[in-house]
Amino acid sequence: MLRLLIPVIHHDGALQAARHAAFLHAERCVSEVEIVEVLEPLDWGRTAAFHSQSALRLHEKRVMLSALMNTRAILDDAGVPYRWSRAFGPVAETIAARAALQQSDAVIVDASQLGFLTRWWIIARLWRLTRAPVTMLH
């Protein structure tokens, strides 16, 4: 049975990845799922020059909480056992570190809401940084 890692990296959540995990759980392929909410450092963007970091972090947490709740609702409806956590750092490096720490058997990334270049940048970095197979859904 597989242990899956599903990163939530976009404000729309990881709905496709959660649906895929629910399907694999129904087929008796998945034993547990870990959802990781990945938040990038705020000082990397231009908005940090115009807004306080606490206000930006609060807004990001609200938006990402909504995305996380939608993703968790799919897993709850399917009866998939999961746990979730929040991690701060660069997207690819944070996902790879979490996959190594939790000894995940596979990483499923929902890239349906990401742009073409962002999608390929993340997958290329993940393939280099992690030993676990990476599946990108779009």
Image: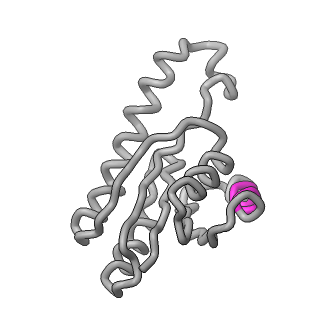
Residue at 66%, 23% in the rendered image: 43
Dividing the picture into quadrants, the one containing residue 109 is bottom right
Residue at 36%, 40% in the rendered image: 65
| The N terminus sits in image quarter | bottom left
Dividing the picture into quadrants, the one containing residue 15 is bottom left
Residue range in magenta is 120-126
Measuring from the top left, give residue 18's x and y in whole percent.
40, 66
Q: How many marks?
A: 0
Is 111 on the left-hand or right-hand side of 119?
Answer: left
Dominant secondary structure of the residues highlighted in magenta in the image:
helix
The stretch drawn in magenta includes residue 123? yes
Is 68 on the left-hand or right-hand side of 76?
Answer: right
Measuring from the top left, give residue 40's x and y in whole percent.
60, 36
Q: Which one is in front, 132 or 15?
A: 132
| The C terminus sits in image quarter | bottom right
Q: Which one is in front, 35 or 9?
A: 35
Q: Which one is in front, 73 or 105?
A: 105
Measuring from the top left, give residue 73's x and y in whole percent.
27, 58
Residue at 49%, 61% in the rendered image: 5
Above or below, 55 against 28 in this view is above
